[in-house]
């Protein structure tokens, strides 16, 4: 991990593929931030991070929020652990973050666990704790209503990459033995110098507004294609979140 410099800005692309019951695909340019949760950057209006935007929110630090969540899952965040977060920053005061990823590294560089935090457009959030294999793979049971066109069942197959050359998150949703949906973010981390940040933001301005707008736009497109809307059940957050 020593070769991976943070904070980093990660320009890249997001791709979604819906396979059933209507095929629908899109890809767009975007960027995210890779940061140490104990040293969160701030670039005036272009990037800021608030602990309230993640996990159980509140006035405590992001590290305290994360420690509370993973303690409820029978894990421990040790004082010497480093936690890196891939997420959207607040841009011009607004953030929508469909997926944040937290990697926890022991002082010797060993990956201890990861947390996936998912936000939907209804203001709800859910977190999953996992222990990836050596190649960054794991599965978790789906437990959260995200798309209005998918039920809350099945499992996510997840593959993560975190190197100086690539940051990637790929998720496949399997329901009833069939892969029905795939989403992926892939980018190359770059040191978050002021010049680099300004260049990336100029290429993709108002990025968090874009994310929120495109999710709703594609949802409307699917609804117009008469894709059945699934009832949203009450959400029960996991322990500690």
Image (cartoon, grey):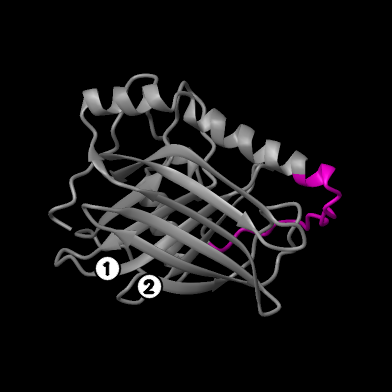
Q: Nearer the viewer, residue 214 or 98?
A: 214
Residue 29 seen from this side: yes
User: Do the residues bearing badges 1 and 2 touch, measured as CB atoms within 8 Å?
Assistant: yes
Residue depicted at 13% across the width and 55% down the height? 2
Q: Is residue 38 above or below residue 135?
A: above
Image quadrant assignment for residue 228: bottom right
Name the residue beneath numbered marker 2: 132
Residue depicted at 39% across the width and 34% down the height? 49
Q: Residues within 10 Å of mark 2 (few under 14, many from 20)?
A: some
Residue 64: x %, y % from top left: 37, 50
Residue 11 belongs to magenta span: no
Q: Which residues are magenta?
A: 222-239
Residue 58 seen from this side: no
Residue depicted at 52% across the width and 50% down the height? 15
Name the residue beneath numbered marker 1: 111
Residue 84: x %, y % from top left: 30, 52
Residue extending farthest bottom: 177
Question: How many numbered badges does the structure rendering display?
Answer: 2
Q: Nearer the viewer, residue 233 or 9?
A: 9
Q: Secondary structure at mark 1?
A: strand
Residue 212: x %, y % from top left: 60, 35
């Amino acid at each position: 991990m020593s070769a991976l410099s943070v904070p980093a800005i990660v320009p890249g692309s997001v791709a979604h593929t819906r396979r059933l019951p209507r095929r629908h695909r899109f890809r767009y340019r975007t960027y995210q931030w890779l940061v140490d949760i104990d040293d969160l950057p701030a670039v005036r209006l272009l990037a800021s991070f608030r602990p309230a935007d993640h996990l159980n929110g509140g006035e405590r630090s992001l590290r305290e929020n994360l420690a509370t969540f993973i303690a409820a899952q029978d894990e421990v965040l040790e004082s010497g652990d480093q936690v890196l977060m891939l997420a959207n920053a607040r841009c011009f005061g607004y953030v929508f973050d469909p997926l944040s990823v937290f990697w926890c590294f022991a002082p010797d560089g060993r990956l201890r666990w990861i947390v996936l935090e998912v936000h939907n457009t209804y203001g709800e959030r859910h977190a999953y704790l996992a222990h990836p294999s050596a190649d960054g793979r794991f599965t978790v049971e789906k437990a959260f209503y995200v798309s209005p066109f998918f039920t809350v069942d099945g499992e996510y197959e997840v593959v993560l990459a975190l190197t100086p050359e690539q940051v990637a998150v790929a998720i496949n949703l399997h329901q009833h033995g069939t892969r029905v949906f795939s989403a992926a973010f892939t980018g190359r981390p770059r040191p978050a110098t002021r010049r680099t940040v300004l260049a990336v933001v100029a290429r993709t301005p108002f990025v968090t507004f874009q994310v929120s707008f495109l999710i709703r736009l594609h949802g409307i497109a699917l609804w117009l294609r008469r894709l059945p809307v699934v009832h949203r059940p009450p959400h029960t957050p996991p322990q500690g979140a």
